Amino acid sequence: MVAGGAGGIGTATSVRLADEGAAVVVGDLNGDAALEVAARIEKDGGRAIACELDVSDDSSAAAGVRLAIDTFGGLDGLHANAADMSPETIGGDSDILDISLDVFDRTLDVNLRGHVLCTRHALPHLLERGGGALVYTSSAAAFVGEPQRPAYAISKSGLSALVRHIASKWGKSGIRANGVAPGLVLSEAAKASMGDAGDDFIAYALGITRSTRLGDPDDIAAMVAMLCSDDGAWINGQVVSVDGGATLR
């Protein structure tokens, strides 16, 4: 199940998991986009089903997990990738003195609490099957210390605590929980959110990256797929930076 499975990283991850042989539930707040991704997967010979998924709503998160079980007979992994990147939310995430508490609450409601809700519904089924993988999309913002976007950074920092809690509590039961922390990934949504300052910001980001390019959604999908697979069997409780060397930890 990919929560936030349509658009940018979500699309790339849903497609990559299907290419690797997984049956994928593509859940997204944009139900039409989720249907398009699932149709693309099936056209290419994979197995997928779409659902409209609002991770901030407990019943919606529960329904997404139930759909996976009813359709494919069980659940082996969850990629929690949802975030509110709307202009009114991310655009209002200014600094801790000026940010509206409505923006702060909405950011944590989706980016952190929503991941908790998905986890609470998915984890019992993973335990019933003797183990499984939980992978969360974090961000370099969780640890670089930006002068803006405090709510976003706080929400992503909270995912690090969630990952470590799950690994510590249920690692011996076969559960692996990890995060992927992307740097600047040039998805269409990311470029649109930059507006007129996009070229300048891209040039700045490339300048502080120890790489010849910035990120592509497929870069993140590749790491998620590895962490969900047997190749990632001995990785647990980690937040892995996939950012071209922009951060060194």
Image (tube, rainbow, N blue to C red):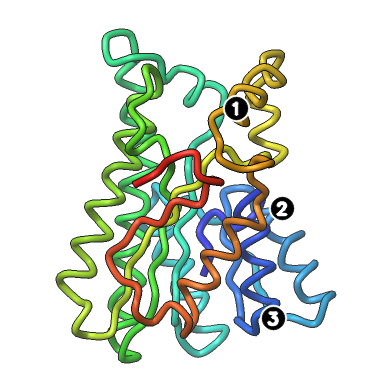
Q: Residue at x 31, y 73 (%)?
A: 123
Q: Nearer the viewer, mark 1 or mark 2?
A: 1
Give the mark, 3 or 1, whose residue is nearer the N terminus. Answer: 3
Q: Nearer the viewer, mark 2 or mark 3?
A: 3
- Report which residue position mark 3 lands on: 47
Q: Please state which of residues 131 and 148 is positioned toward the viewer in this rendering.
A: 148
Q: Is residue 46 left or right of residue 248?
A: right
Residue 40: x percent and y percent?
A: 80, 67
- Report which residue position mark 2 lands on: 32
Residue 168: x percent and y percent?
A: 16, 69
Q: Which mark is residue 207?
A: 1
Residue 14 vertical placement versus 30 (above, below): below
Q: CA distance from mark 3 to mark 1?
A: 40 Å
Q: Residue furthest left?
A: 169
Crowdedness of circle 3 by 10 Å Cα count: few (<14), some, many (20+)? many
Q: Please state which of residues 244 and 10 is positioned toward the viewer in this rendering.
A: 244
Q: Residue at x 44, y 69 (%)?
A: 78
- The amino acid type, in three-letter code, at marker 3 is Arg
